[in-house]
Structure formats: C-alpha cells, structure tokens
Image: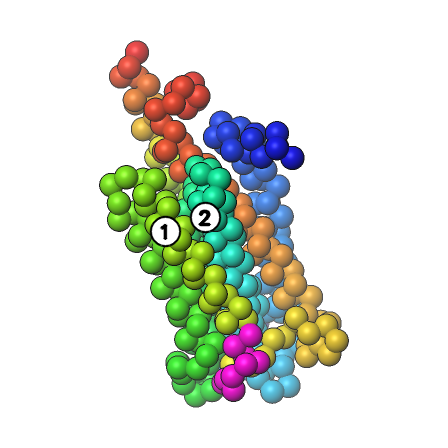
Amino acid sequence: MWTWFHQLSSPPHFYRMAGRLLPWFAWPALLLIAVGTYGGLVLAPPDYQQGDAFRIIYVHVPSAWLSLFGYVAMAVAAGIGLIWRMKLAHVAANAIAPLGASFTALALATGSIWGKPMWGTWWVWDARLTSELILLFLYLGYIALNRAFDDRKQGDRASAVLALVGVVNVPIIHYSVEWWNTLHQPATITKFDSPSITGDMLWPLLVMWLGFTFYFIAVALQRARAETLQRERRSAWVGELS
Amino acid sequence: MNEFLFMGGYAAYVWSCFGLTFAVLIANVMLARHSHRKILRELETQGGKSQ
C-alpha cells in the first residue's frame, strides 16, 4: 500500500502511468457516448407525459452527475494534498476543477432549456437549481483562489480548504428534491425499488452515464499530465523527455 | 427523417441541448490536448537552448 502510494506520488511514474491508462478510458468513452446518443435519440420511445423533450435527460443527467462526481473527486484530491502535502494530489484537483465547472454549467444550461417547455420558465430559485448554481461558484472560486497567489503552494492550500468546505453543498444538491418542495423532478435512476423509467428508456441513460464518466477520467488524466510537466519543467526527468 | 428532426415539436430544445453538450465535450478534449502539446513544445525549445 505504501509503496503504491509512494509510486503514485512520483511525478515521472504518474506521467507515464496516466499516459498508458488514457486510451483505456478515452476509446470506451467514445464508443459508449456514441451508442448512448443513438439509443437516447432514436431507439428510446417518447415519454407519455413529456413527449420527445424528455430525451434531454440523456445529456442533462450525466452532466449533473459529473458535476457532483467531479466535485467530490476534486475535494478528496485537495484533502490528500493538504494532509500529506502531496503535490500530485493538488495537480489532480487542479485538473478536475475546470472540467467539473464545465459540466456544472452544462447541467444548468440543459436543465434550463428543458425547463422552458416543461415548467414554462428558464429558471426558478428553487433548492435544486440554486444549490447547483452554488456548485458552479465553488468550482470558479477554487480556480480563482488557486491562481491568486504568487506562491503556488499557498494557492494550492487555500483552494484546497475552499474545496473541502464546499463539500457540504454536495449532499444538499443530492437531497434537495426530497428535503424541499421543488419544481425539479425527483431522482430517476437511483430508486431501484420503484424505478420510474422503463428498460428501453433506461439503458441509453446508463450507457451515457458510464461513457461520460470514462470521458471525464480520460480528459482529467490528460490535463493532469500537462500540469505535471508544467510544474516539473525544471526537473531532470522532464528534461529527458524532450 | 423529418419526423426525427422535428422531435415532436421540441426540436429547438432537444437539439440545442445535444449541440451544447457535444460542444463542451469537444472543447474539453481540445483544451487538454492543446495545453499538453504546448508544454511539450516549450520544453523542446528550452532543451535546445541549454545544449
């Protein structure tokens, strides 16, 4: 366990390992997203209440999932960096932040576009939407704070604290549709006891969800590789690369 | 085909959501690849100078 931890924290080892792992996430992601898009747009039947508008679920739910998954991953990495002073953990958190922010913005945008025909409004200040908007500000706050210091270590630590404090928002987003009366509909796939979606509508959603997750890991790995080189540019192993 | 594009009257909403999503997916990949290539190029010129 400790040798593994030590190896993982070695930048050259991480750089090579991430490069080798990358295609194993990138290619399945491409395939899954292609299949999921076809299944969602073509094969799934229209919803009896929402008609074809429900198809937005196939991009909205995976985006919203990534906004939360990304935040938790970023906060865990930031916490590891803070406690064990592991540089690579901060690199990982930094690699995730803009990516997570983009999916949070996407979840808000697709939700808004879905809300217009279904609820009759682009936006309401209800619990789910407001807490998701706060998530976007947490991501942006992390990015801004990380870059606000001349000393990179200080920036890493300050933004890591913000990431950890912001974790309280994650369960609030998840349970907001149960705790408060919101306009947002409750969970579709997390209630396995009484699923609110039929099989031929569900499978493209699960495929998309998996594809988006693989995509996220692949892009985060590539971003982390670039930042590793950037930070280690003066060290011997980076010199040997070129 | 036309019926598929029409999306039961929700074409503008459905297609803008999918369009936006793929724009974000492609942009993230391009940004990541661009920053990786950029630093590799910088390292190459750096290495060239020191030799």
Same chain under badges 1 and 2? The reply is yes
Sort mark 2 into few (<14), some (14-19) or many (20+) by Cα contacts within 10 Å.
Answer: many
What subunit carries mark 1? Answer: A
Question: Can you say which quadrant of the picture contains the C terminus of chain A?
Answer: top left
Residue A182 magenta-highlighted: yes
Query: Which residue does the numbered mark 2 point to in the structure image?
Result: A78
Question: Can you say which quadrant of the picture contains the N terminus of chain A?
Answer: top right
Residue A167 falls left or right of residue A212: left
The residues bearing labels 1 and 2 have C-alpha atoms spaced at a distance of: 8 Å
Residue drawn at (56%, 31%), measured in percent from left and top?
A6
Q: Is residue A109 above or below residue B32?
A: below
Q: x%, y% of residue A78?
A: 45, 48
Residue drawn at (28%, 39%), measured in percent from left and top?
A151
Instruction: Indicate the amino acid at tag 2.
Output: Ala
Q: Identify the secondary structure beneath mark 1.
A: helix
Q: Are circles 1 and 2 on residues that touch, CB within 8 Å?
A: yes
Q: Residue furthest top?
A: B51
Of the pair A15 and A76, the residue shown nearer to us: A76
Q: x%, y% of residue A113?
A: 43, 76
Query: Which residue does the numbered mark 1 point to in the structure image?
Result: A159
Q: Identify the secondary structure beneath mark 2.
A: helix
Where are the magenta residues, as a range? Answer: A175-183
User: Can residue B19 be seen in the rendering of this structure?
Assistant: no
Q: Is residue A165 above or below residue A90?
A: below
Q: x%, y% of residue A145?
A: 31, 52
Q: Is residue A146 above or below residue A230?
A: below
